[in-house]
Amino acid sequence: MKWDNQLINHLQWSNAIINREGKEIVAQEIAAMAKEGDVIGAGSGSTVYLTLFALAERIRKESLHIEVIPASAEISMSCIQLGIPQTTLWNKRPDWAFDGADEVDPERSLIKGRGGAMFKEKLLIKSSGKSFIIIDDTKLVDHLGSRFPIPVEVFPSALTFVESEMRRLGASEITLRLAGGKDGPVLTENGNFILDTRFSYIDPSLEENLKAITGVIESGLFIGYDVEIVVAK
């Protein structure tokens, strides 16, 4: 017996989609890569959302059998809305994954996490055989941190300790991310806080050093990952 999922069935993307036409073209290209039986990791962001529509179209037209592992509740609900089967990392490993990014430097290192799902996104990328990062050219930067701070997911009780340790690492600015639809801070998919953090220089070891702080769940730094960058025109 199925629920009458009116809330999910009428779900709309939460923000305006910039460069929608270009992103839809790339979404079609990514969806065209799906093969029968693929398990696909789906990150978060507007281009991921649009790619789900392209995958759903292939499922309807070609009777394609795939499963998606979503990185966020919003993407999971979109899969339900579109009739895309889902699975979990408990019982399946992704054949490949696709995701977006907030910044990409010339070495293909990334800042992610404006949507607050960087822990699951990083887990999907590390678990996948191949990962595609879909962006438009506004996300290309000469060096990370040019436009966006580094999101750091923090266990709530460790907030003050983590702040102190990040300042010791050289953080020049640390802001607790506040929610837009509720009072108080944003809570991640895992019930944690996010600290948006700026450093004057992002050393290649910074991702590892942040993760080593007790209380840090994950950061939005993705340095040295084997990803393919796909740029929407």
Image (cartoon, rainbow, N blue to C red):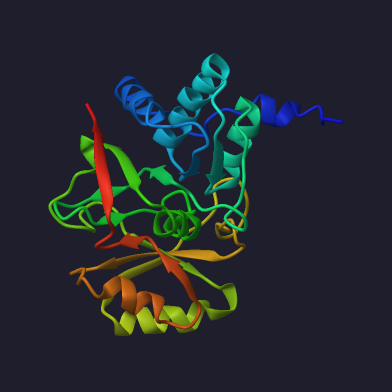
The part of the image, by quadrant, that contains residue 172 is bottom left
Quadrant for the N terminus, please: top right
Residue farthest to the right, as pictured: 1
**Where's residue 205, x and y in %?**
24, 75
Residue 12 position within the rendered picture, expressed as x and y whole percent measured from the top left: 57, 27
Q: Nearer the viewer, residue 75 or 128?
A: 128
Q: Quadrant of residue 11?
A: top right
Q: Please tell me in which quadrant of the rendered image residue 109 appears.
A: bottom left
Q: Quadrant of the C terminus?
A: top left
Please determine whether, in this image, residue 183 is positioned above or below residue 31: below
Question: What residue appears at the point 39 percent right and 44 percent down from the top-left corner?
Answer: 99
Q: Residue at x 21, y 68 (%)?
A: 202
Pick whichever, 55 or 80, lies toward us. 55
In the image, taking residue 131 as reference, residue 203 lies left or right, namely left
Examine the rendered structure and indicate whether residue 42 appears above or below residue 118: above
| Residue 118 percent across, percent down from the top left | 44, 57
In front of the other: 38 or 116: 38
Residue 88 in the figure: left or right of residue 160:
right
